[in-house]
């Protein structure tokens, strides 16, 4: 009986400290006119003003287009299969590098921090 009470107390403490594990779950859907269901994504340009645009906007250098990131990365069938890998490598890895360097960093592992609806992905 004591063991069950301890397990319950630890679970409740974990939920209070970390939040409910299923409280906010992003939904797979046809976001950004994707050919298959994907998670929504959010990106706040104002949070990234210290980052040179060219670090993310390769299309400014290689002249591959001027549309939104998602406009190309979802509609271009050569790029589409790499969507998750490319954005995780670019966005999450940049945040991890900043965190390791002791700089202010964005989210690194909490999926819901990035996978929210955004009018301008």
Image (tube, grey):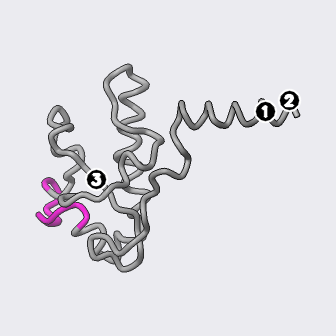
At numbered mark 1, what does the secondary structure look like: helix, strand or loop? helix
Q: What's the mark number on residue 5?
A: 1
Q: Split into 4 quadrants, where in the image is the N terminus?
A: top right
Q: Earlier in the sequence, mark 3 or mark 1?
A: 1
At numbered mark 2, what does the secondary structure look like: helix, strand or loop? helix
Horizontal placement of 20 versus 5: left or right? left
At numbered mark 3, what does the secondary structure look like: helix, strand or loop? loop
Crowd rating for badge 1 (residues with CA inside 10 Å; few <14, some 14–19, many 20+): few
- Residue 10 against residue 35 in the figure, above or below: above
Q: Split into 4 quadrants, where in the image is the C terminus?
A: bottom left
- Residue 25 against residue 5 in the figure, above or below: below
- The mark lying in front, picked from 3 and 2, is 2
Query: Does the magenta segment cover residue 9?
Result: no
Q: Earlier in the sequence, mark 3 or mark 2?
A: 2
Disc 2 from disc 1: Cα separation? 5 Å
Task: Please tell me in which quadrant of the rendered image residue 71 appears.
Answer: bottom left
Residue positioned 34% across, 30% down in the render: 105
Residue positioned 19% across, 52% down in the render: 57
Which portion, as a residue range, is magenta? 60-70
């Amino acid at each position: 009986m004591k063991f069950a009470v301890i397990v319950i107390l630890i679970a409740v403490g974990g939920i209070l400290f970390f939040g409910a594990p299923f409280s906010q779950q992003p939904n797979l859907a046809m976001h950004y006119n994707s050919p298959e269901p994907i998670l929504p994504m959010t990106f706040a340009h104002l949070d990234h003003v210290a980052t040179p645009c060219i670090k993310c906007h390769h299309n400014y250098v290689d002249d591959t287009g001027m549309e939104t990131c998602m406009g190309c990365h979802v509609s271009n069938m050569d790029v589409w299969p790499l969507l998750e890998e490319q954005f995780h490598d670019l966005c999450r890895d940049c945040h991890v590098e900043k965190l390791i360097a002791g700089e202010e960093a964005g989210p690194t592992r909490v999926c819901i921090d990035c996978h929210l609806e955004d009018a301008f992905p």
